[in-house]
Image (cartoon, grey):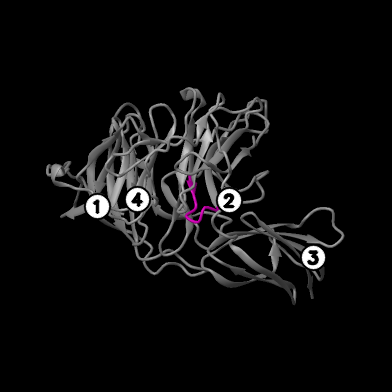
Amino acid sequence: MRRLTIAPLIAVLAFLWVPAANADSLVFRDKDSDVAVARPDGSLVKKVTHASNPDNGYKAVSVADDGGITAFLNQRDDSGNSTFVVLNQDGVVLHGPYLFERYGICGGLSPFRTATSPDGTFVAVVYMKGSNNCLGGTSVLSTRIINRNAPTIGTSTYPSYDYLTEPHWTRHPDVRLAGINGGTVSVWQNDATKMDSWLALPVGSPYQFGGFDFHPTETKVLIDFGPANGIGVQPHRLELYTYTQFSTGANPPTSPEPQLVCALDAYVSNEGGGGRPFWSPDGSQIAWTGPEGIYVSPAPVANGDTCVLQPRLVVPGGSDVHWAKFAVTTPAGSGATGSGSGATTPTTPAKPKTPPALALAKALPAKKAFVLSLTFRRPALVSVTVTRKGAKKPLGTVSYIVKKKGIDNRRITKVRGKALKRGVYRVVVKVGAAKKALMVSVR
């Protein structure tokens, strides 16, 4: 990756910018720690939640394409467990509240950042995982995948990645999980069981990754770089890259190294958690959090090696900004209300709008293996638990990502690195909230 040293350049013609009229909206936390929504120009601000005080507010906000807003309650129960709900823009609870249970007997969970998959099936949650050693054991920063629409008990149902932070879901050319691990942006490459390094920070760089976001329809990525030492209020740098492809299957990408398009020094400071830019759903605008609140600008344009922005402060005091595909409606006179615990309760819970991703499931016998033949309505994460007939414990779980809808035939020959032996097996397939149990023979 090449690195430029440039002077700041933010367009002084910002007053000429008129935001395009579309259905995209901003979702964020307001100064009261409530979830709120607004139009991209900052108009029609509306509270989604109504906490009795900031301590009873919400955090770790993210949004899916169906408009569902995932939000964790600030307060935890006496055991250190956290709770989250999925809301619409009027505060109606679509799913939950669901428990995000404590993991590790010492130390507590503290979810502070989430990323909801575009189809609304999964949420990647960043938290501090407690240790299992009460005699000096340390907590570990981790990202765990949970089901957005149903309880997820334990950490073995879906993948969990220690030391991974800033989770994001790519949209183009397909849906994958990405995140930051140290000085590397890592992405699902061959399957969902591990994260593979994709973009590394140069050795000796004065910066560290502070956030990133993939363009919704083009092979572009925005990266925010914060100061390496992280001490005091310091400026962040914004860089725009293009790339050719990720790897698919067992094949490496033909052009794995992203190419720098332009950069902008000091586009925001780290005061108040500034940075973390996000593309709008149509890719025409970006939004980020600054010390004064939320800024929106047309997408960066390259002027030589320099990215030109036209930022406007649209939501003073706002933070943790995300984009949503819905249009903000006029605040209703009734609907969601705040309770003493800060939770928002509905009059009538709404039903999920989309059918399960898994349509059909079959298991076919094979020599030293079995074949899962699954039919999908959309891309999804698959979790397969295999148990030999008569055994008390399963052999283990195999997880993988299906990148497109239709029939996916997957040959399973090993579980946890051990080859399957001849015999009958019970296979439990989980895709989101859907679960299917099958029996199959291995010849």
Q: Which sits earlier in the primary sequence, circle 3 or circle 2?
A: 2
Secondary structure mainly formed by the magenta segment: loop
Distance from label 1 to label 4 (Cα)?
10 Å
Q: Position of residue 150 (x, y in %)?
A: 63, 47
Front of the two marks 3 and 1: 1
The residue that mark 3 highlights is 425
Q: Is residue 357 above or below residue 91?
A: below
Disc 4: which residue: 24
Choose the circle earlier in sequence order: 2 or 1: 1
What amino acid is found at the position of numbered circle 4 in the picture?
Asp
Q: How far apart are labels 2 and 1 at the CA level? A: 32 Å
Q: What distance separates the C-alpha of mark 3 from that of mark 4?
A: 48 Å
> Label 1, on which residue?
20
User: Which amino acid type corresponds to the residue marked 2 in the rendered image?
Assistant: Lys
**What residue is shown with label 2?**
351
Q: Which amino acid lies under the numbered mark 3 shown in the image of this protein?
A: Tyr
